Each structure stands twice: as structure tokens, then as C-alpha cells.
Amino acid sequence: MLDSAAELMMVHGDFKGAFDTCNAGLENLRRLEPEDNRCAELKAGFCMLGVQALAELNLWRGVFSWVLQHYEHQEHLPSKIMQLCILLYSKVGEPAEIQEAARVWLHCLSNIRAPGFRSVAELYLLHVLVPLGHLEEARELVTSEVCSDAFTEEQRQTALDVVEEKARQNQGDPINPGVTSDSEIAAHPASTQGSLLHKLEAMLRFLYRKCLRTGSGSFPVRKVFLASVLLYMLLFRMDPAFSSSFMWISKLLQLIKQMWRAMFAPYYQPLT
């Protein structure tokens, strides 16, 4: 049944069928001897496939509660299932949903010697505590006796460096992080206008030199002159009182620059 569930999910993309097969397999395992090691491995396998199937069905909110139906206590979860749950809730942007369960699991003495303890601790640190900004708890976790045997000195220092880097980023964040680049352009019209005019001036200087060199040859002088006039009308004659005009000009300028590089890259590059 485990192979059948894996085939339904991986080969046929039948996530609902795979989840139903996992449920049926778990029900069958309940009638077997719980002390059987193979039973424990199959149970973990069914649960891991079931978690992935629920995620594919966009039913991730019920993943952990479903897992706990088959493991009475969250601290008794196998390390692989805990790792998978941390990654899932981190992927969907809800690491807080698994925070308490992961904390309880890590502080359970019977899990400290588990083969996957260090991996769970690393994932909890990088995908739960750091994204949520719980940096003090992250420092305590790395330096605690719980993780003293799990991490080497080098790994502990690397983890602390990650936490400190996140702390520096938080200190360097602007007061109003919601301000977009368009809002910044609107808030500083004078400096933005000066930058745009400077770029336009450089482009027009190149056009002037190009026209002088080519004369009436193959280079389309009249078309270039017309383009220059259009740029002048757009950038100089547009009412600067409207902040939205600068956003539009900025987008237009980006488009013009892309076209410019494509057409005149060998000549334009020295002017930048």
C-alpha cells in the first residue's frame, strides 16, 4: 500500500487517491503489533506521503492535526516528519503554526539522541525563529545544553553568525518598509527630475555626435531627430506638479534604455 500511494502521487498525480491510500494503510497498521520496528517505519512513511499529498491539495492547514491523529504526542514524532512539517509551514509563509510543536520536540530529552535532532534544530532555527524575528530565542537555542552535543563549535558559530546578520538587517530596515520605489520617486521629484534630465542629456549628446559623423548616410537622421523631439516633449513638457508623471517617466526611461542597449550597445556603453 505504501508503494501504491507513492505511485499514485509521483506517477499519476492523484493526490487525493494517494492520501486515501495512506489513511487506509495507517488504519491497517493499527491492528499490527506496535512494537514492530517495521510497523514504525511504515507508519512514518505513510505519514510523510500523506503530508505531501495534503500540501499538494492545498490542505496544509490541517497537516499537523492529521499527523497528531496517528501520533498521540507531538514530542514522539519521528524527526523526518518534524523536518517535513517545518519546511511545509515555512514554505507557505506560516512558520508560527509549527513553532510551539518544534520547540516542545527539541526540548524532549528522548529526542536529543535521535539521529535527526540536529537537522530539526537547524530547520527550526533558520525557517522558524529567524524569519519570525525571535533572535534572542535563537541565540539561547544555539548556546543551550540541549544543542551542545548536536552542534560542533564551528556549526554553533555559523548559526550565531546567521542570527547576528539577521539582527543587523533588522536594525538597518527603514522606519516605513512599505514605501515603494514609486513612492520614493514621488517624494523626491526634484532629484528624480535632475537624474532623468542628466540621462536624457547624455543620450542627446550621443545622437548629436552620431548625426555629425554619419551625415546623410545610412543612419536615419530624420528619425533620430523625431525621436529626440518626442523625448523632449515627454520629459520636459510634462507637468512636474503631478507626482504620478515621474513614475510613468521612470518606466518609460527603463524601456528606452533597454531599446538603446539593444541598438547601440558598442557606442552607448562608454557613455555610462
Image (spheres, rainbow, N blue to C red):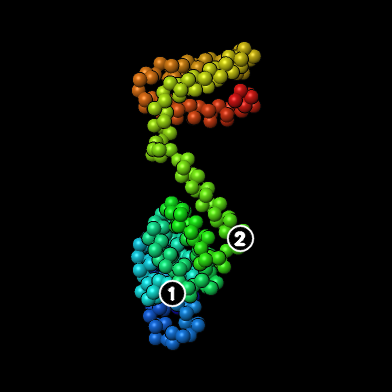
Q: Is residue 214 left or right of residue 69?
A: right
Seen in the picture, residue 150 relative to 23 is either above or below; the reply is above
Label 2: few (<14), some (14–19) or many (≥20) C-alpha neighbours in 10 Å: few
Residue at the spot 52% in from the left edge and 49% down from the top edge = 164
Q: Nearer the viewer, mark 2 or mark 1?
A: 2
How many numbered circles does the render carry? Answer: 2
Residue at the spot 46% in from the left edge and 53% down from the top edge = 135
Q: Nearer the viewer, residue 108 or 221?
A: 108
Q: Is residue 93 left or right of residue 147?
A: left
Q: Does residue 49 appear anywhere in the picture? A: no
Q: Amino acid at mark 1?
A: His
Identify the element where label 2 is drawn: helix
Identify the element where label 1 is drawn: helix
Q: Position of residue 259 (x, y in %)?
A: 53, 29
Which image quadrant for residue 263?
top right
Label 1: few (<14), some (14–19) or many (≥20) C-alpha neighbours in 10 Å: some
Q: Which residue is mark 1?
A: 76
Q: Could you tell me how far apart the alpha carbons at marks 2 and 1 are, in whole angstroms?
A: 28 Å
Q: Is residue 272 left or right of residue 228?
A: right
Which image quadrant for residue 251?
top left
Residue at the spot 42% in from the left edge and 72% down from the top edge = 75
Q: Nearer the viewer, residue 50 or 13?
A: 50
Please give the label number shown on residue 195: none
Q: Nearer the viewer, residue 70 or 257?
A: 70
Q: Position of residue 124 (x, y in %)?
A: 47, 61
Which image quadrant for residue 220?
top right
Q: Which residue is mark 2?
A: 153
- Sequence order check, earlier mark of 2 and 1: 1
Q: Position of residue 213 (x, y in %)?
A: 64, 14
Q: Position of residue 173 (x, y in %)?
A: 45, 40
Q: Is residue 126 left or right of residue 272?
A: left
Q: Amino acid at mark 2?
A: Glu
